[in-house]
Amino acid sequence: MRIEKRFRHTLLALALASPVTFATQLQPLPASAASARPIGVIDQVFAFHDAMPTGVTVSETGRIFVNFPRWGDAVPFTVGEIRDGRVQPYPNAAINTEDPDDPAKGFISVQSVVADGMGRIWVLDTAAPEFATPRPGGAKLVAIDLASNRVVKTLVFPPEVILPTTYVNDMRFDFRVGKQGTVYVTDSSVSGPGGIIVMDIASGKASRRLSGAAQTSVDPDFVPVVEGRPALLTKGTDGKPKALGVASDGIALSADGKDLYFSPLSSRHLYAVSTALLRDPAVSEAQLQAAVRNLGEKGASDGLEADAEGAVYATDYEHNGIRKRLPDGTWQTIVHDPRVLWPDTLSIGPDGYLYFTANQLHRSPGFNGGQDLRSKPYSLLRVKIDAAPAPTH
Protein backbone atom coordinates (compact mmCIF):
# COMPACT_ATOMS: atom_id res chain seq x y z
CA MET A 1 0.00 0.00 0.00
CA ARG A 2 2.82 2.44 0.88
CA ILE A 3 4.66 1.67 -2.38
CA GLU A 4 1.52 2.26 -4.47
CA LYS A 5 0.80 5.52 -2.65
CA ARG A 6 4.40 6.73 -3.04
CA PHE A 7 4.29 5.82 -6.77
CA ARG A 8 1.11 7.83 -7.33
CA HIS A 9 2.59 10.84 -5.55
CA THR A 10 5.72 10.60 -7.71
CA LEU A 11 3.66 10.57 -10.94
CA LEU A 12 1.60 13.55 -9.78
CA ALA A 13 4.74 15.50 -8.90
CA LEU A 14 6.26 14.81 -12.30
CA ALA A 15 3.10 15.89 -14.08
CA LEU A 16 2.88 19.15 -12.13
CA ALA A 17 6.57 19.89 -12.41
CA SER A 18 6.98 19.44 -16.16
CA PRO A 19 3.74 20.04 -18.12
CA VAL A 20 5.68 21.41 -21.09
CA THR A 21 7.67 18.20 -21.42
CA PHE A 22 4.49 16.14 -21.68
CA ALA A 23 2.88 18.58 -24.15
CA THR A 24 5.87 18.63 -26.47
CA GLN A 25 5.63 14.86 -26.80
CA LEU A 26 2.13 15.05 -28.36
CA GLN A 27 1.90 14.33 -32.08
CA PRO A 28 -0.94 14.65 -34.59
CA LEU A 29 -2.82 11.40 -35.04
CA PRO A 30 -1.36 9.76 -38.18
CA ALA A 31 -3.59 8.92 -41.10
CA SER A 32 -2.56 5.30 -40.66
CA ALA A 33 -4.16 5.09 -37.19
CA ALA A 34 -6.95 2.56 -36.77
CA SER A 35 -10.38 3.85 -37.81
CA ALA A 36 -13.90 2.55 -38.31
CA ARG A 37 -14.17 0.05 -41.13
CA PRO A 38 -16.73 0.72 -43.85
CA ILE A 39 -19.33 -1.97 -44.50
CA GLY A 40 -20.68 -2.76 -47.95
CA VAL A 41 -19.38 -1.93 -51.41
CA ILE A 42 -21.29 1.09 -52.72
CA ASP A 43 -21.33 2.44 -56.26
CA GLN A 44 -22.22 5.98 -57.26
CA VAL A 45 -24.89 5.73 -59.93
CA PHE A 46 -25.34 9.47 -60.43
CA ALA A 47 -24.07 12.77 -58.99
CA PHE A 48 -26.49 15.67 -58.60
CA HIS A 49 -24.90 19.12 -58.92
CA ASP A 50 -28.08 21.18 -58.73
CA ALA A 51 -31.27 20.60 -56.68
CA MET A 52 -31.34 18.12 -53.79
CA PRO A 53 -33.17 14.84 -54.54
CA THR A 54 -35.22 12.84 -52.07
CA GLY A 55 -36.95 9.95 -53.84
CA VAL A 56 -35.70 7.32 -56.26
CA THR A 57 -37.39 4.37 -57.91
CA VAL A 58 -36.17 1.75 -60.37
CA SER A 59 -38.66 0.19 -62.76
CA GLU A 60 -38.84 -3.51 -63.62
CA THR A 61 -36.92 -2.73 -66.83
CA GLY A 62 -34.19 -0.79 -65.00
CA ARG A 63 -35.26 2.79 -65.75
CA ILE A 64 -34.36 5.17 -62.92
CA PHE A 65 -36.58 8.04 -61.78
CA VAL A 66 -35.92 10.66 -59.10
CA ASN A 67 -37.75 13.62 -57.62
CA PHE A 68 -36.86 17.00 -56.16
CA PRO A 69 -39.30 18.56 -53.67
CA ARG A 70 -39.56 22.32 -53.73
CA TRP A 71 -38.00 23.04 -50.34
CA GLY A 72 -35.98 26.12 -51.24
CA ASP A 73 -33.56 24.98 -53.94
CA ALA A 74 -34.11 26.14 -57.50
CA VAL A 75 -36.16 23.24 -58.88
CA PRO A 76 -36.87 23.56 -62.62
CA PHE A 77 -38.69 20.21 -62.57
CA THR A 78 -39.79 18.15 -59.60
CA VAL A 79 -39.77 14.71 -61.31
CA GLY A 80 -36.99 13.48 -63.57
CA GLU A 81 -35.60 10.41 -65.29
CA ILE A 82 -31.88 9.67 -65.39
CA ARG A 83 -30.99 8.90 -68.98
CA ASP A 84 -28.20 9.70 -71.41
CA GLY A 85 -26.01 10.81 -68.51
CA ARG A 86 -28.29 13.51 -67.16
CA VAL A 87 -31.60 14.09 -65.38
CA GLN A 88 -34.40 15.03 -67.73
CA PRO A 89 -37.88 16.25 -66.76
CA TYR A 90 -40.37 13.40 -66.69
CA PRO A 91 -42.68 12.79 -68.41
CA ASN A 92 -42.17 16.31 -69.80
CA ALA A 93 -41.35 19.82 -68.65
CA ALA A 94 -44.91 21.14 -68.96
CA ILE A 95 -46.44 18.83 -66.34
CA ASN A 96 -43.65 19.77 -63.91
CA THR A 97 -45.13 23.25 -63.61
CA GLU A 98 -47.99 24.07 -61.24
CA ASP A 99 -51.25 25.00 -62.95
CA PRO A 100 -52.67 27.88 -60.87
CA ASP A 101 -56.14 27.33 -62.35
CA ASP A 102 -56.22 23.59 -61.66
CA PRO A 103 -53.94 22.27 -58.88
CA ALA A 104 -54.84 18.69 -59.86
CA LYS A 105 -53.00 19.01 -63.20
CA GLY A 106 -49.37 20.09 -62.83
CA PHE A 107 -46.84 18.75 -60.32
CA ILE A 108 -46.51 21.23 -57.43
CA SER A 109 -43.90 19.65 -55.14
CA VAL A 110 -43.25 15.93 -55.43
CA GLN A 111 -41.92 14.00 -52.45
CA SER A 112 -41.89 10.46 -53.78
CA VAL A 113 -41.92 8.37 -56.98
CA VAL A 114 -42.59 4.63 -56.99
CA ALA A 115 -42.54 2.09 -59.82
CA ASP A 116 -45.47 -0.28 -59.30
CA GLY A 117 -44.17 -3.40 -61.07
CA MET A 118 -47.08 -3.09 -63.51
CA GLY A 119 -45.45 -0.88 -66.13
CA ARG A 120 -46.15 2.44 -64.43
CA ILE A 121 -44.58 4.87 -62.04
CA TRP A 122 -46.66 6.79 -59.55
CA VAL A 123 -45.93 10.35 -58.51
CA LEU A 124 -46.87 11.54 -55.02
CA ASP A 125 -47.46 15.28 -55.08
CA THR A 126 -47.58 16.89 -51.64
CA ALA A 127 -48.91 20.17 -53.07
CA ALA A 128 -47.07 21.67 -50.09
CA PRO A 129 -43.89 23.48 -51.11
CA GLU A 130 -41.60 24.07 -48.12
CA PHE A 131 -44.06 22.15 -45.90
CA ALA A 132 -46.76 24.78 -46.35
CA THR A 133 -50.48 23.99 -46.06
CA PRO A 134 -51.33 21.77 -49.06
CA ARG A 135 -52.96 23.58 -51.98
CA PRO A 136 -56.67 22.66 -51.92
CA GLY A 137 -57.23 19.88 -54.45
CA GLY A 138 -53.52 19.65 -55.20
CA ALA A 139 -52.35 16.68 -53.12
CA LYS A 140 -52.55 13.76 -55.52
CA LEU A 141 -51.26 10.51 -56.96
CA VAL A 142 -50.45 10.47 -60.67
CA ALA A 143 -49.80 7.26 -62.62
CA ILE A 144 -47.62 7.42 -65.74
CA ASP A 145 -47.48 4.59 -68.26
CA LEU A 146 -43.84 3.76 -68.95
CA ALA A 147 -44.45 2.50 -72.47
CA SER A 148 -46.09 5.71 -73.69
CA ASN A 149 -44.73 8.12 -71.04
CA ARG A 150 -48.26 9.49 -70.65
CA VAL A 151 -50.40 10.12 -67.58
CA VAL A 152 -53.01 7.38 -67.33
CA LYS A 153 -54.59 8.12 -63.95
CA THR A 154 -54.82 10.97 -61.45
CA LEU A 155 -56.19 10.44 -57.95
CA VAL A 156 -56.76 13.60 -55.93
CA PHE A 157 -56.85 12.85 -52.21
CA PRO A 158 -60.31 13.53 -50.75
CA PRO A 159 -60.29 16.63 -48.50
CA GLU A 160 -61.26 14.60 -45.43
CA VAL A 161 -57.86 12.83 -45.41
CA ILE A 162 -55.71 15.89 -46.19
CA LEU A 163 -55.48 18.04 -43.08
CA PRO A 164 -54.03 21.58 -43.13
CA THR A 165 -50.93 20.02 -41.57
CA THR A 166 -50.68 16.99 -43.87
CA TYR A 167 -47.46 16.22 -45.72
CA VAL A 168 -47.88 13.05 -47.78
CA ASN A 169 -44.50 11.38 -47.91
CA ASP A 170 -44.16 7.84 -49.26
CA MET A 171 -46.38 5.11 -50.70
CA ARG A 172 -46.65 1.39 -51.40
CA PHE A 173 -49.00 -0.47 -53.73
CA ASP A 174 -50.81 -3.80 -53.56
CA PHE A 175 -52.75 -4.92 -56.64
CA ARG A 176 -53.88 -8.16 -54.98
CA VAL A 177 -56.67 -6.36 -53.11
CA GLY A 178 -59.34 -4.10 -54.57
CA LYS A 179 -60.63 -3.96 -58.13
CA GLN A 180 -57.62 -1.93 -59.30
CA GLY A 181 -55.48 -2.23 -56.19
CA THR A 182 -54.83 -0.37 -52.97
CA VAL A 183 -52.23 2.23 -52.07
CA TYR A 184 -50.90 3.05 -48.58
CA VAL A 185 -49.47 6.54 -47.98
CA THR A 186 -47.74 8.02 -44.94
CA ASP A 187 -48.56 11.47 -43.59
CA SER A 188 -45.28 12.74 -42.14
CA SER A 189 -46.59 16.01 -40.78
CA VAL A 190 -44.15 18.28 -38.98
CA SER A 191 -46.86 20.19 -37.07
CA GLY A 192 -49.91 17.93 -36.82
CA PRO A 193 -50.92 14.30 -36.50
CA GLY A 194 -49.13 11.65 -38.47
CA GLY A 195 -51.02 8.76 -39.96
CA ILE A 196 -51.50 6.32 -42.81
CA ILE A 197 -53.87 7.06 -45.68
CA VAL A 198 -55.45 4.01 -47.30
CA MET A 199 -56.86 4.60 -50.79
CA ASP A 200 -58.81 2.35 -53.12
CA ILE A 201 -57.40 3.00 -56.58
CA ALA A 202 -60.57 2.17 -58.52
CA SER A 203 -62.89 4.51 -56.64
CA GLY A 204 -60.45 7.03 -55.20
CA LYS A 205 -62.08 6.60 -51.79
CA ALA A 206 -59.62 7.05 -48.93
CA SER A 207 -59.47 6.91 -45.15
CA ARG A 208 -57.05 8.09 -42.48
CA ARG A 209 -55.89 5.34 -40.15
CA LEU A 210 -53.75 5.57 -37.00
CA SER A 211 -54.13 9.35 -37.23
CA GLY A 212 -52.33 10.83 -34.25
CA ALA A 213 -51.59 7.39 -32.81
CA ALA A 214 -48.45 7.01 -30.72
CA GLN A 215 -46.95 4.69 -33.34
CA THR A 216 -47.28 7.21 -36.19
CA SER A 217 -46.27 10.18 -34.03
CA VAL A 218 -43.01 11.84 -33.13
CA ASP A 219 -41.13 10.33 -30.20
CA PRO A 220 -41.15 13.35 -27.83
CA ASP A 221 -37.76 12.43 -26.39
CA PHE A 222 -36.05 11.89 -29.75
CA VAL A 223 -33.16 14.11 -30.80
CA PRO A 224 -31.23 12.81 -33.81
CA VAL A 225 -27.43 12.95 -33.74
CA VAL A 226 -25.79 13.06 -37.16
CA GLU A 227 -22.07 13.57 -37.79
CA GLY A 228 -21.64 13.70 -34.01
CA ARG A 229 -24.00 16.67 -33.48
CA PRO A 230 -27.68 17.13 -32.67
CA ALA A 231 -29.44 17.50 -36.03
CA LEU A 232 -32.67 18.82 -37.52
CA LEU A 233 -32.72 21.75 -35.13
CA THR A 234 -35.07 24.66 -35.73
CA LYS A 235 -36.11 27.65 -33.63
CA GLY A 236 -38.86 27.13 -31.12
CA THR A 237 -41.40 29.77 -30.10
CA ASP A 238 -38.98 30.85 -27.36
CA GLY A 239 -36.22 31.41 -29.90
CA LYS A 240 -34.19 28.46 -28.63
CA PRO A 241 -33.19 25.48 -30.79
CA LYS A 242 -35.52 22.49 -30.76
CA ALA A 243 -35.57 19.19 -32.60
CA LEU A 244 -37.88 19.08 -35.60
CA GLY A 245 -40.52 16.40 -35.17
CA VAL A 246 -41.41 14.43 -38.31
CA ALA A 247 -44.20 11.87 -38.03
CA SER A 248 -44.75 8.59 -39.93
CA ASP A 249 -42.39 8.62 -42.88
CA GLY A 250 -40.83 5.41 -44.18
CA ILE A 251 -43.16 2.66 -45.36
CA ALA A 252 -42.76 -0.86 -46.77
CA LEU A 253 -45.16 -3.65 -47.73
CA SER A 254 -44.35 -7.27 -46.91
CA ALA A 255 -43.84 -9.69 -49.79
CA ASP A 256 -47.22 -11.35 -49.17
CA GLY A 257 -48.99 -8.01 -48.73
CA LYS A 258 -50.24 -8.93 -45.28
CA ASP A 259 -48.18 -6.48 -43.24
CA LEU A 260 -47.36 -2.82 -43.61
CA TYR A 261 -44.14 -1.63 -42.00
CA PHE A 262 -43.72 2.02 -41.05
CA SER A 263 -41.70 4.37 -38.90
CA PRO A 264 -41.79 8.03 -37.88
CA LEU A 265 -38.66 9.85 -39.02
CA SER A 266 -38.33 11.20 -35.48
CA SER A 267 -38.08 7.79 -33.84
CA ARG A 268 -35.84 4.74 -33.86
CA HIS A 269 -38.64 2.17 -33.75
CA LEU A 270 -40.08 -0.01 -36.49
CA TYR A 271 -43.79 -0.83 -36.43
CA ALA A 272 -45.95 -3.28 -38.36
CA VAL A 273 -49.70 -3.64 -38.74
CA SER A 274 -52.01 -5.99 -40.60
CA THR A 275 -53.11 -4.50 -43.92
CA ALA A 276 -56.45 -6.32 -43.63
CA LEU A 277 -57.14 -4.42 -40.43
CA LEU A 278 -56.05 -1.14 -42.01
CA ARG A 279 -58.52 -1.61 -44.85
CA ASP A 280 -61.44 -2.72 -42.67
CA PRO A 281 -63.68 0.23 -41.71
CA ALA A 282 -65.31 -1.93 -39.03
CA VAL A 283 -62.02 -2.00 -37.10
CA SER A 284 -61.99 0.92 -34.69
CA GLU A 285 -58.99 3.16 -34.18
CA ALA A 286 -58.54 1.77 -30.68
CA GLN A 287 -58.55 -1.79 -32.01
CA LEU A 288 -56.15 -0.86 -34.79
CA GLN A 289 -53.70 0.84 -32.43
CA ALA A 290 -53.78 -2.21 -30.17
CA ALA A 291 -52.95 -4.42 -33.17
CA VAL A 292 -49.83 -2.46 -34.15
CA ARG A 293 -46.68 -4.44 -33.36
CA ASN A 294 -43.58 -2.67 -32.07
CA LEU A 295 -40.67 -4.51 -33.68
CA GLY A 296 -38.07 -2.72 -31.59
CA GLU A 297 -35.29 -0.30 -32.40
CA LYS A 298 -33.69 -0.24 -35.84
CA GLY A 299 -31.93 3.12 -35.76
CA ALA A 300 -33.37 6.38 -37.06
CA SER A 301 -34.73 5.95 -40.58
CA ASP A 302 -35.98 8.02 -43.45
CA GLY A 303 -36.73 5.30 -46.02
CA LEU A 304 -37.89 1.68 -45.75
CA GLU A 305 -38.12 -1.09 -48.35
CA ALA A 306 -38.93 -4.82 -48.46
CA ASP A 307 -37.70 -7.62 -50.69
CA ALA A 308 -39.30 -10.76 -52.08
CA GLU A 309 -37.65 -12.98 -49.46
CA GLY A 310 -39.27 -11.29 -46.46
CA ALA A 311 -36.44 -8.94 -45.44
CA VAL A 312 -37.00 -5.28 -44.58
CA TYR A 313 -34.39 -2.59 -45.23
CA ALA A 314 -34.10 0.67 -43.30
CA THR A 315 -31.85 3.63 -43.74
CA ASP A 316 -29.91 4.64 -40.63
CA TYR A 317 -29.19 8.33 -41.04
CA GLU A 318 -27.51 8.71 -37.66
CA HIS A 319 -24.86 6.14 -38.59
CA ASN A 320 -24.41 6.78 -42.34
CA GLY A 321 -25.80 3.39 -43.14
CA ILE A 322 -28.48 0.95 -44.15
CA ARG A 323 -29.69 -1.98 -42.06
CA LYS A 324 -31.48 -5.19 -43.04
CA ARG A 325 -34.03 -7.01 -40.90
CA LEU A 326 -34.12 -10.73 -41.66
CA PRO A 327 -37.42 -12.65 -41.49
CA ASP A 328 -36.43 -13.99 -38.05
CA GLY A 329 -36.12 -10.44 -36.70
CA THR A 330 -32.32 -10.30 -36.72
CA TRP A 331 -30.75 -7.03 -37.90
CA GLN A 332 -27.64 -6.74 -40.08
CA THR A 333 -25.76 -3.63 -41.14
CA ILE A 334 -25.25 -3.84 -44.91
CA VAL A 335 -23.91 -0.30 -45.44
CA HIS A 336 -21.82 1.89 -43.16
CA ASP A 337 -19.77 4.58 -44.85
CA PRO A 338 -18.96 8.22 -43.98
CA ARG A 339 -19.93 9.23 -47.54
CA VAL A 340 -23.51 8.07 -46.98
CA LEU A 341 -24.67 11.42 -45.63
CA TRP A 342 -28.36 11.16 -44.83
CA PRO A 343 -29.53 8.10 -46.78
CA ASP A 344 -33.10 8.88 -47.76
CA THR A 345 -35.23 6.71 -50.08
CA LEU A 346 -34.69 3.03 -50.96
CA SER A 347 -35.63 1.12 -54.11
CA ILE A 348 -34.72 -2.41 -55.20
CA GLY A 349 -33.93 -2.75 -58.88
CA PRO A 350 -34.31 -5.78 -61.16
CA ASP A 351 -30.52 -6.17 -61.10
CA GLY A 352 -30.39 -7.22 -57.44
CA TYR A 353 -29.11 -3.83 -56.25
CA LEU A 354 -30.59 -1.62 -53.55
CA TYR A 355 -30.60 1.97 -54.79
CA PHE A 356 -30.69 4.94 -52.42
CA THR A 357 -30.20 8.69 -52.35
CA ALA A 358 -27.74 10.41 -49.99
CA ASN A 359 -28.75 14.06 -49.88
CA GLN A 360 -27.22 15.67 -46.76
CA LEU A 361 -30.65 16.77 -45.53
CA HIS A 362 -29.32 17.56 -42.06
CA ARG A 363 -26.94 20.15 -43.57
CA SER A 364 -29.79 22.10 -45.19
CA PRO A 365 -30.20 25.82 -44.35
CA GLY A 366 -33.44 25.26 -42.45
CA PHE A 367 -31.60 23.22 -39.82
CA ASN A 368 -28.50 25.38 -39.57
CA GLY A 369 -29.69 28.91 -38.90
CA GLY A 370 -30.12 29.62 -42.61
CA GLN A 371 -26.59 28.51 -43.48
CA ASP A 372 -26.30 25.95 -46.26
CA LEU A 373 -23.70 23.39 -45.17
CA ARG A 374 -24.40 20.91 -47.96
CA SER A 375 -21.49 20.00 -50.20
CA LYS A 376 -22.44 19.13 -53.77
CA PRO A 377 -22.78 16.79 -55.44
CA TYR A 378 -25.54 14.78 -53.80
CA SER A 379 -25.45 11.11 -54.70
CA LEU A 380 -27.55 8.28 -56.00
CA LEU A 381 -25.84 5.14 -54.71
CA ARG A 382 -26.40 1.41 -54.81
CA VAL A 383 -25.28 -1.73 -52.98
CA LYS A 384 -25.63 -5.33 -54.13
CA ILE A 385 -28.18 -7.31 -52.09
CA ASP A 386 -28.96 -10.16 -54.54
CA ALA A 387 -32.67 -9.85 -53.85
CA ALA A 388 -35.76 -8.95 -55.86
CA PRO A 389 -38.29 -6.30 -54.85
CA ALA A 390 -41.37 -7.42 -52.95
CA PRO A 391 -44.09 -8.29 -55.48
CA THR A 392 -47.10 -6.01 -55.87
CA HIS A 393 -49.38 -8.41 -57.74
Image: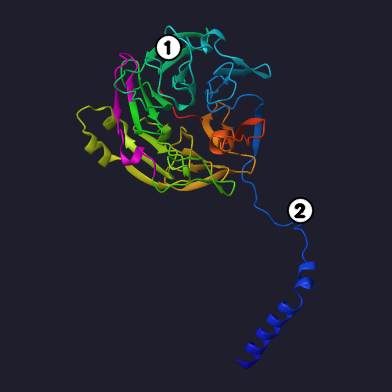
- Which residue is under mark 2? 31
Q: Are marks 1 and 2 in contact (CB under 8 Å)?
A: no
Query: Is 183 displayed left or right of 81 in the figure?
Result: left
- Looking at this view, is 366 or 125 the one in front? 366
The mark tally for this picture is 2
Q: Is residue 113 visible?
A: no
Residue 315 in the image: state x and y as whole percent. Answer: 51, 39
Is 67 a magenta residue? no
- Which residue is under mark 1? 103
Seen in the picture, residue 101 relative to 285 is either above or below; the reply is above
Assign a secondary structure to mark 1.
loop
Name, please, the residue furthest toward the bottom: 2
**In the image, what residue occupies the spot 50% across and 45% down?**
224
Quarter of the image holding residue 372?
Answer: top right
Q: Is residue 375 visible?
A: yes
Q: Which residues are magenta?
A: 198-219
Residue 187 in the image: state x and y as whole percent. Answer: 38, 29
